[in-house]
Image (cartoon, rainbow, N blue to C red):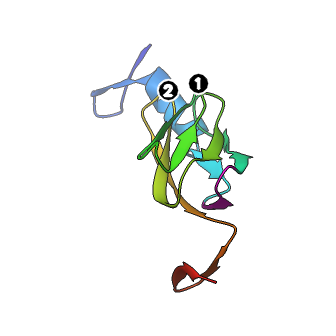
Amino acid sequence: LEAKTISGGRIDAARAIDKALDPGLLVSPPMVHLEVRDEIRLEASRGLSPYTFTSSDTGVVQVSANGTVRATGNGHGVVTVTDRRGTEVEVPVEIADSARTCEPTGCGAS
């Protein structure tokens, strides 16, 4: 579907409507702190489904096709959520043993 602007230019009306109706991809929770072997499910909304979920480091964090994040090792990782349009949101993930404590300044031995 095409439309003309007042000045005679052309725009893709379907794309313009999609952009106007899509307020942007939102992922909840926006950051994750887990202990090794714990799981949490990320919820994606306000984007165009389907969503894909990828991990920056599967040795630290794995993520399933439905957004379930599983802590597989100590450290830091990022889960990237992408919608059909290619919009991406990065969710930082921090994993620690239950024997470790995490403070705002970082994680250390307890």
Residue 63 image offset from top left, x and y in percent:
57, 38
User: Tag 1: Cα neighbours inside 10 Å, few (<14), some, or many (≥20)?
Assistant: few
Looking at the image, which residue sits at the far top? Answer: 1
**Disc 1 residue type (three-letter):** Pro
Instruction: Quote the CA–CA distance across marks 2 and 1.
Output: 6 Å
The residue where tag 2 is placed is: 84
Q: Is residue 33 magenta?
A: yes
Residue at (64, 55) in percent of width and height:
36
Q: Which residues are magenta?
A: 31-37
Q: Is residue 93 magenta?
A: no
Indicate the secondary structure of the residue bearing disc 2.
loop
Q: Quadrant of the C terminus?
A: bottom right
**Disc 2 residue type (three-letter):** Arg
Residue 39 image offset from top left, x and y in percent:
71, 47
Which of 100 and 83 lies nearest the eye of the viewer?
100
Residue at (53, 53) in percent of width and height:
73
Which sits earlier in the primary sequence, circle 2 or circle 1?
1
Which of 24 and 97 lies nearest the eye of the viewer?
97
Within the image, what quadrant is residue 45 found in?
A: top right
As drawn, 67 above or below 104: above
Residue 94 image offset from top left, x and y in percent:
55, 63
Q: Are marks 2 and 1 in contact (CB under 8 Å)?
A: yes
User: Tag 2: Cα neighbours inside 10 Å, few (<14), some, or many (≥20)?
Assistant: few
Residue 57 image offset from top left, x and y in percent:
42, 46
Q: For the image shown, how many numbered marks are present on the structure?
A: 2
Which dot marks residue 50? 1
Which dot marks residue 72? none
Within the image, what quadrant is residue 96 found in?
A: bottom right
Indicate the secondary structure of the residue bearing disc 1.
loop
Residue at (57, 47) in percent of width and height:
72
